[in-house]
Amino acid sequence: MSVDMYHLRRQTRQLGNLYHQLHELKYQTGPTPEIKTHQPAGPRPPANWLYLACYITQEQKLREVAFNAFQGLGIRLADTDTGANRLCQLIGYHAQAISELEWSSDFQDEIEDQIRIITNRCKDTLTVPNTPQDTWLTARTICYKLRPHVTPDLLRKWAQRGKIRHRKGHPHNTYPLGDVLKQLHTTSNPTTPGDVT
């Protein structure tokens, strides 16, 4: 039974976004406890083990079904194509061919299961996708949309001070539009003298 290639493409795009968010959560430390407890000397775990275990387990499952699909289609992968985000991109690119496989419904079931599992694991930290407030944009795009109120230097300053979130990307850093709008609103309507900037 074949599946809808457009639906499969949308699902892999969503799964890629979930893997990106889960990757960011791996390296976040939890909130500081109210009561100081004695921790033994020695090395600390480099990441949040709960998110790390979920990431590793789900990535292995994705790799297994993706490799089976690509092998059945005769598609060769490079050594750099084994990460979860890259596999999601390749699945989206080859969605039409994958949707014509005999076991494409099983493939889609695995993608849906992974979306469900990762969403449940990160449900407290995930935002609803496709809302204009949660769109991550480059500094150039935000400055163009909100000119003359926002400049790239102002965005950088807010991010350094922790007033807005930011993602460091390869070519450009990105900022969530919702955070920028909230910060712009509090800056233009300060409640206390310390709220300016």
Image (cartoon, helix red, strand yellow):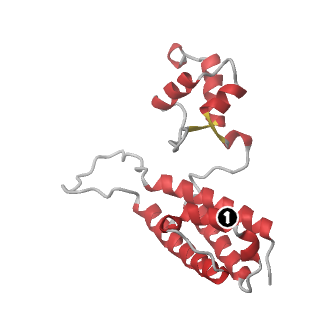
Residue 114 place in picture, x, y as percent: 61, 70
- Residue assigned mark 1: 12
Residue 117 place in picture, x, y as percent: 59, 68
Left or right: 106, with 157 as reference point? right
10 or 178, which is in the foreground? 10
| Quadrant assignment for the N terminus | bottom right
Left or right: 93, with 25 as reference point? right
Q: Residue at x 79, y 65 (%)?
A: 6
Q: Is residue 98 above or below residue 119?
A: below
39 or 196, which is in the foreground? 196
Residue 181 place in picture, x, y as percent: 66, 29
- How many residues crowd around disc 1 within 10 Å: few (fewer than 14), some, or many (20 or more)? many
Q: Residue at x 65, y 23 (%)?
A: 185
Left or right: 51, with 149 as reference point? left
For badge 1, the amino acid type reads Thr
Q: Residue furthest left?
A: 41
Query: In which image quadrant can residue 123 be found?
Result: bottom right
Work out whether residue 62 can be spotted. yes
Q: Is residue 22 above or below residue 107?
A: above
Residue 46 place in picture, x, y as percent: 34, 56
87 or 183, which is in the foreground? 87
Q: Residue furthest bottom?
A: 102
Q: Residue at x 28, y 56 (%)?
A: 44
Left or right: 6, with 157 as reference point? right
Work out whether residue 189 can be spotted. no
Q: Circle 1 sits in a helix, a strand or a loop, which is it?
A: helix
Q: Is residue 16 above or below residue 155?
A: below
Query: In which image quadrant can residue 87 be found?
Result: bottom right
Q: How many marks?
A: 1
